[in-house]
Amino acid sequence: MLSLQAPLALLAASGGGLSEEIMHHIADSELHLPAWLDQWLHPLVESFGITKAVFMMLIASAILILGLCVLLRRPRSGTEVPNGMMNAVEMLVLFVRDDIAIANMGEKWGRRFTPFLLTLFLFILTCNLLGLVPGGFTATSNLNVTGSLAIISFLVFVLTGMYALGPVGYVRHMVPSGTPLPIAPLVIFLEVISMLVRPAALMIRLAANMTAGHIVIMIILGFIILFQSIALATVSVPLAAAIMLLELIVAFIQAYVFTLLTALYVGMLVAEEH
């Protein structure tokens, strides 16, 4: 963030318009709908407190549900051989199952958790990609969203650990074998702190990575208005486009990292089941 202070200061010196727009993009959560749509949805938005992040999550959910229902329907020809997008979906499922779930959790637990991990991966990925659509908003740049996802992951690996090891075994696994009894409470305390840090790290990592790229793009494009130079646009626009492509890669990487760490945390517990 230190590297962004100078450009933000310049934007603020130009009258504050661009800096206010950047902060509005980051902090504002109010949902703004077109007038023709707002008259129909305004009561619903007010009643349920739907923000931009919630609205984008609803869109992501609808895309996934409708898209997968269409892609996974049985072929009318009766053949079971997948083709087209079905191949892509099958490759994605196998990737999550074999390289994330089973690789970190073992055959038994990996197959059990594949549906959950696949849902987590696809949902985060869709929310990330929707943020790159003009006029869209990255729901995963909101700490409320990433915090909720992190809490879900936290509950999954804690409850799974208790189920696999038992309540007593879950506490026992926090103390390494051979630990002197007097310092065992301290070790358990440190393990609890470490356990609580995991969801916090998941929350902050995803939100920070999905926010940083958008800020950089807005600042680069803002320089065109700040210096009012067409020549500068020949540099800023291609550079912003390159960062957009980088953001596309980051969207996949961050969905993968969040899912991988969730599987890893669960795997660290169920590996001690036997």
Image: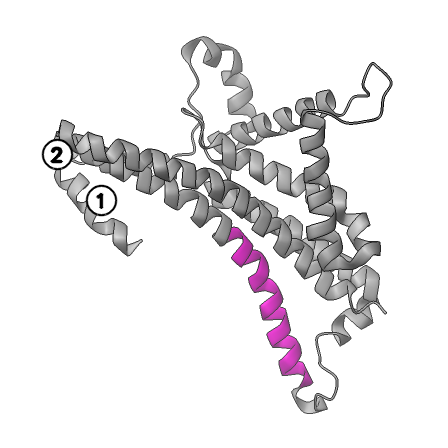
For residue 131, side relative to residue 125 (left or right): left
Colouring mode (rainbow / by chain / secondary structure / one colour): one colour
Mark whose residue sits in front, 2 or 1: 2
Could you tell me residue 195's position as x and y percent? Answer: 62, 65
Question: Bounds of the magenta span?
Answer: 184-203
The numbered dot on residue 227 is 2
For the point 36% across and 39% down, which residue is it?
A: 243
Find the distance from the CA under tag 2 to the CA under tag 1: 14 Å
Q: Nearer the viewer, residue 7 or 242?
A: 242
Q: Amino acid at mark 2?
A: Phe
Q: Which residue is mark 1?
A: 8
Q: Quadrant of residue 228?
A: top left
Q: Is most of the magenta stretch helix, strand or loop?
A: helix
Q: In the rendered structure, does residue 202 fall within the stretch colored magenta?
A: yes
For residue 58, side relative to residue 93 (left or right): left
- Marks 2 and 1, the one that precedes in the sequence: 1
**Secondary structure beneath disc 2?**
helix
**Secondary structure beneath disc 1?**
helix
For residue 195, side relative to residue 136 (left or right): right
